[in-house]
Image (cartoon, rainbow, N blue to C red):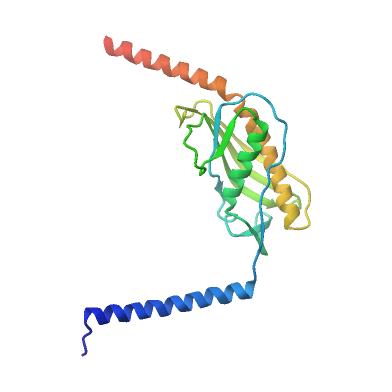
Amino acid sequence: MKHLSAAQALSTRRSLLLGAAGLGVMAVTLTACSSGSPSLYTLAVVPGQAQAGGPRYVEVRQPTIASGLDRDRMVTKDTGYKLTVASNDAWGDSLAGQISRAMAGDLAQRLPGTAVFAENDAVTTQPDAYVELSVTRFAEGPSGRVEIEAALSVQPALAGAPAGDEGVYLQRLHVQGGTVSGSVSLAQELSTLLGQIADTAAAQLRLVPAQQQQLAEQQRQQQAAAVRKGHK
């Protein structure tokens, strides 16, 4: 039996890996050539009613997306039992990233006195409140109309950290739009429905400053009670 030196073995392994990589690249290239470049779509900020009030800083957290929706190609229809996926139409970015940025833009427009940013933005400011979505439907629904089903959470923060269960707004939302005839109108209708959800979130965010004062007062009272108990 012929034994290879360490250098020969390493050279042979590299040759095998390079050969395998070349086959992989060729397979990817062939797939790309056969499928063609997809058309890319984005969600847009939809104007709403701007009103005063709200906290100074709001962070829109990366939403949770149902696994069936979390894919490169657009899910165009969701009947509850079957998902229809576009053959050559895709989101220009991850769906979670698209939703968080569109929601941040929607809220910034509706709360002109509030600085709103997405979770992954390069911002070091501590938020006064958090907004989060858990999305389970984001396509044309069984009725033939575009639908979004999601759980919306609005939570005040103290010193940049969520304030716990106190003051949390959690609501299951189901919003419906019109019928659509293609991916462009689907993206437009989903953007409009996301704006409606932003209306609900903005209304709750305007209550946050008063909630923060109440929570801070409760925290002070608890600390004072703990100090008194310690002195006994």
In the visual, does 44 lie left or right of 21?
right
Residue 158 at least partly seen: yes
Residue 141 at least partly seen: no
In the visual, does 156 lie left or right of 87?
left
Query: Quarter of the image containing the N terminus?
Result: bottom left
Q: Position of residue 157 (x, y in %)?
A: 49, 28
Residue 196 lies, with reference to residue 159, above or below; the image says below
Residue at 48% x, 20% y: name it.
Answer: 215
Q: Residue furthest bottom?
A: 1
Of residues 85 and 29, the one nearer the viewer is 29
Residue 30 lies, with reference to residue 74, above or below; the image says below
Residue 186 lies, with reference to residue 158, above or below; the image says below
Residue at 46% x, 30% y: name it.
Answer: 160
Of residues 172 and 56, the one nearer the viewer is 56
Residue 85 lies, with reference to residue 9, above or below; the image says above
Residue at 27% x, 80% y: name it.
Answer: 9
Instruction: State the image quarter where residue 19 is shown.
Output: bottom left
Residue at 58% x, 35% y: name it.
Answer: 116
Q: Position of residue 87 (x, y in %)?
A: 67, 66
State how many labels appear: 0
Q: Position of residue 220 (x, y in %)?
A: 42, 16
Instruction: State the image quarter where residue 175 is shown.
Output: top right
Query: Quarter of the image containing the C terminus?
Result: top left
Q: Position of residue 36 (x, y in %)?
A: 65, 71
